[in-house]
Amino acid sequence: MTEHKTNSLVITDKIAKLENCISTKKQLKIIEEIAKEGEIGQKALLELLINRRIVKKTEIGYLDGCIFEILQSTENIIIRENVNKSFNKGLIKLNTSLKNNYQPLQQLLICQKFQEADKLTQTMLCKLAGLDKNSKRKWLYFTDISSMPSEDLYTIDMLWRIYSRGKFGFSIQRQIWLTNNCNWEKLWNKIGWKNQGTPCRYPNEFIWDISAPNGHLPLFNQLRGVQVLSALFQHIVWNQSN
């Protein structure tokens, strides 16, 4: 058997393992192994992504985001061009009926410009609350949250989750909060908003890359209290998306 056929069989076997693996961490490891096989491996990953997202139109998952991330960062120009050709606006098709245009947020998250994405997210949330750029108030009240459209909140959260390997997003923060019996101090420490009990200072003491703890982003100002975040965690959208 030739080396090419051997590599193809190994890649085929790993592709099969990918779709049967439920651990995002393990999926990422397998994806990286396949990508290291060079163009043959990267082509196989691209074919899998196209099959999932365009042909079968399966429900989007962290597997898609991980494959997309790895292929976007490859040194193979042809692979990158084909990725951009197939997914020129990203993995997530955004509904035009939403209150905001979320494509700029999608693009920032694709590029892992998390600090810029965080700022834009806060601006979009204020806009959803009816606070435009001319508003004197630049922060949210807890009473603003319940009126925010579920579809918009879900889209913002999904963009953060898919382009962060499932690490970031409101629903991720909420799940950590629930897992820790809704204890705020435990949440702050788990997601890295406090360091040994002291609130982190914005922006330098926060982590703006994928190495951050789960739930680290997007940010909310916990120094103003927990009412806004509590209202967000109790928004009807999370009951609808479970």
Image: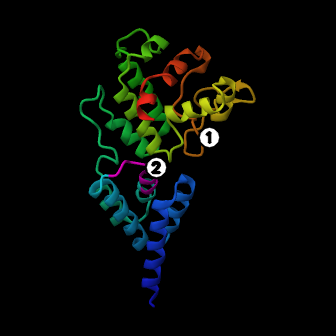
Spatial distance from mark 2 to mark 1, Cα to Cα?
17 Å
Display coloring: rainbow
Residue type at tag 2? Tyr
Image quadrant occupied by the C terminus: top left
Residue under the image location 32 percent in, 38 percent down:
103
Q: Mark 2 points at which residue?
A: 62
User: Is residue 124 found inside the magenta-colored segment of the image?
Assistant: no
Q: Which stretch is magenta? A: 58-67
Q: Earlier in the sequence, mark 2 or mark 1?
A: 2
Say if 83 sits above or below 144 in the image. Answer: below
Compare residues 115 and 36 and report the one nearer the observer. Answer: 36
Residue bearing mark 1: 213
- Which residue is found at the position 30% from the left and 61% from the top? 82
In what element is the residue under mark 2?
A: helix
Q: How crowded is mark 1: few (under 14 residues within 10 Å), some or many (20 or more)?
A: some
Are there few (<14), some (14-19), or many (20+) residues within 10 Å of tag 2? many
At which x and y percent is residue 231?
A: 50, 18
Name the quadrant of the N terminus. bottom left
Task: Identify the element where label 1 is drawn.
Answer: loop
